[in-house]
Image: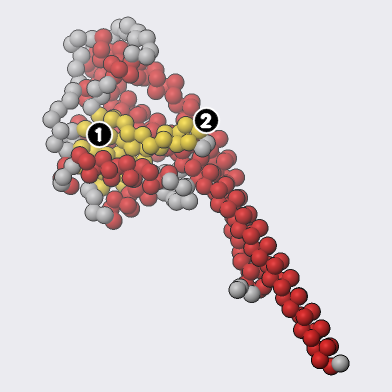
Amino acid sequence: MASLRDIKTRITSTKKTSQITKAMEMVSAAKLNRAETNAKSFVPYMEKIQEVVASISLGSTDASHPMLVSRPVKKTGYLVITSDRGLAGAYNSSVIRAVSNAIKERHSSEDEFAIIALGRVGKDFFQKRGYNVVEGVVGLPDQPNFADIKEIANKAVSMFSDGAYDELYMYYNHYVSAIQQDVTEKKVLPLTNLESEASSSSLTSYEFEPNAEEILEVLLPQYAESLIYGALLDGKASEHAARMTAMKNATDNAKDIINNLTLSYNRARQAAITQEITEIVGGAAALE
């Protein structure tokens, strides 16, 4: 049985740990409020640019662009959004598991896919296991601006245009609520599902200057980059929510441990006192 000093030491160290997890929970809660606002405020822009792109591509018979056309798939790109740090519950592991399962199901050789990793956890995981990680970005801020990922988003789109891969999938955690984040797979390129996405919104007729094809040449890469940025905002909100929940659970578990250790400490202290009384009474009886 542990001594009173050992139990007291464990109680003290657990209390210190609970103070840290409580502070981390409060920090994540503050970051979540801002990240949730950023993600929601980006939605109207995404809906509008999606409507414009769909209206131009579907409303003009002579407009065409390589990003709108499916081609034989020889290589697939995977853009994986994780965090730079842990202590976020299953936030990172669920995304990594989904990507790993997809790769195992779809590919038999490493030459058939390439990975672009946003976040240190995903980057380190796939690199250590010998996966083909062509790009990795770490150190993104908790509240990223488009300028923070413009270069990597532009490169991801350019790699598709240059034929480095023939399709691009994106994996991230979609923010539903503070206690629910769903792993999401989204096909970014080619943009072959515009018709289904535009069916829920009314298409507007536009006049083009100089012409629809030149407008799509500029607009489609921006739209694809916006999809990546929107997923990153969604992922950041999910990350802060997952970390807040994980730290809350850790704090609650620490309180339970402290309660159990305090009960054990009191029992051991009571047993020690009873033992001392018994020894004193026994000693007094012996003297008589």
Give the mark, 2 or 1, whose residue is nearer the N terminus: 2
Residue ID at (58%, 53%): 253
Residue ID at (32%, 34%): 185
The answer to whether residue 57 is left or right of residue 183 is left
x then y, percent, for residue 72: 13, 30
Q: 38 or 17, which is in the foreground?
A: 17
Where residue 49 sits, quadrant-wise, is top left
Disc 1 packing (10 Å; few <14; some 14–19; many ≥20)? many
Give the residue at mark 1: 168
Q: Secondary structure at mark 1?
A: strand
Give the residue at mark 2: 37
Q: 64 or 82, which is in the foreground?
A: 82
Can you say whether 49 is above or below 280 in the image? above
Q: Quadrant of the N terminus?
A: bottom right
Which kind of residue does numbered mark 1 sit on?
Answer: Leu
Q: Quadrant of the C terminus?
A: bottom right
Residue ID at (32%, 6%): 205
Which kind of residue does numbered mark 2 sit on?
Answer: Thr
The answer to whether residue 282 is left or right of residue 141 is right
Q: Residue furthest bottom?
A: 287
